[in-house]
Image (cartoon, grey):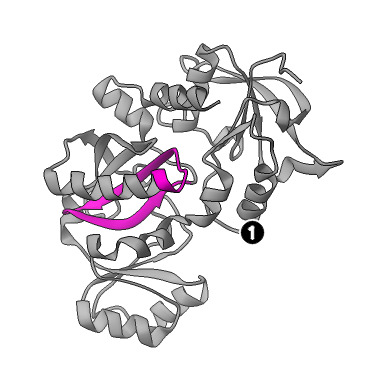
Amino acid sequence: MKKINKIVAIQGDSLHLMNRKTDTTLLLALEAQKRNYKIFYYQTKNLIFSKNKILAYCNEVEFNENKKNFYKIKNIKKLDLSKAHFVLMRQNPPFNMDYITATYLLQKLPKTTKVLNNPFAVRNIPEKLSSIYFTKLMPPSLFAKNINEILKFKKEYKKIIIKPTHGYGGNNILFVTHKTPKKEIVKYLNKNTHVMAQKFLPQIKKGDKRIFIIDGKIKGAIKRVPKKKSIISNLSQGGTAIKTKLNSKEMIIAKKVADFLKENNILFAGIDLIANYLIGDINVTSPTGLKNFKDLTGKDLSIDIWNCLERSN
């Protein structure tokens, strides 16, 4: 049956958490509106499978980036997601069972409804864990929960970073030195599942690079510089975005990851590098930074994403 309306459904976090000045989801929604799509926005808790249909309680939303109150809820509707041309998975991790459940439900949608990113691919490329395929491009790294393995790793590399395997946005990162008491590391491990430990790269003080990959192509990058006395460069943690270019080593790393993502049906991703090392974050669930890139360069990569989506549909 031919679709009457052009519809985009966005699966995200609560609308009030969206940042008008920096949000990539908003940039994608604004470009969809320019292409005459109606926007329906929902959270994973409002997904339903009933009578062989994938449904969601959605807010029909109109966005306007130039207003302080930049979104307007027009009405609430129980939407059959198969009626949508596209579904954008844009909720932030953690990559927990709620997230995984959503991928299984969205995977049931017909091929006429394109999901960004492909839910099967998102489920099988769990961000930090996917970096195990690229260990030669990374600083010394360890995935573990065993305290003895973590202590052994710390002894070998002196200064290390520990972060949740399924975390995001620079949250809950532990910087460990010879002064860090064992009980603090044990407490951290008890609060998390497997963690990722990495040799600390002091070059982070000068910033990391977020590289944008769209349909297997390297489309650009921003440099993210931590605020003073911080080692966390994420923009949500106070980091500053500045213009940057990629050197030849960074291009080689990015190309290898881009080829992997293309082979695994990931259309849009962001990867992070420090000092010519991939640091393990292969962001496929809800990549960010496009608004910052647009502000710095004038280039709107949401146009590239929508061009790819519409060609594929």
Q: Quadrant of the C terminus?
A: top right
Specify the quadrant of the image occupied by residue 297: top left
Please indicate whether residue 219 sits to the left or right of residue 268 in the image.
left
User: Which element is circle 1 on?
Assistant: helix
Q: Residues within 10 Å of mark 1 (few under 14, many from 20)?
A: few
Residue placed most toward the observer, 242 or 87: 87
Residue placed most toward the observer, 31 or 66: 31
Q: Is residue 302 above or below residue 66?
A: below
Which residue lies most toward the right here? 51
Q: Quadrant of the N terminus?
A: top right
Instruction: Give the residue at x 23% y 60%.
Output: 137
Decide if residue 186 is in sight here.
Answer: yes
Task: Based on the picture, tell me whether residue 282 belongs to the magenta stretch.
Answer: yes
- What's the magenta bit mostly, secondary-structure-wise? strand
Task: Based on the picture, tell me whether residue 165 belongs to the magenta stretch.
Answer: no
- Read off the residue under disc 1: 97
Instruction: Give the residue at x 25% y 70%.
Output: 140
Specify the quadrant of the image occupied by residue 299: top left
Residue placed most toward the observer, 300 or 180: 300
Q: Position of residue 57 (x, y in %)?
A: 76, 34
Range of magenta residues: 262-284
**Amino acid type at mark 1:** Met
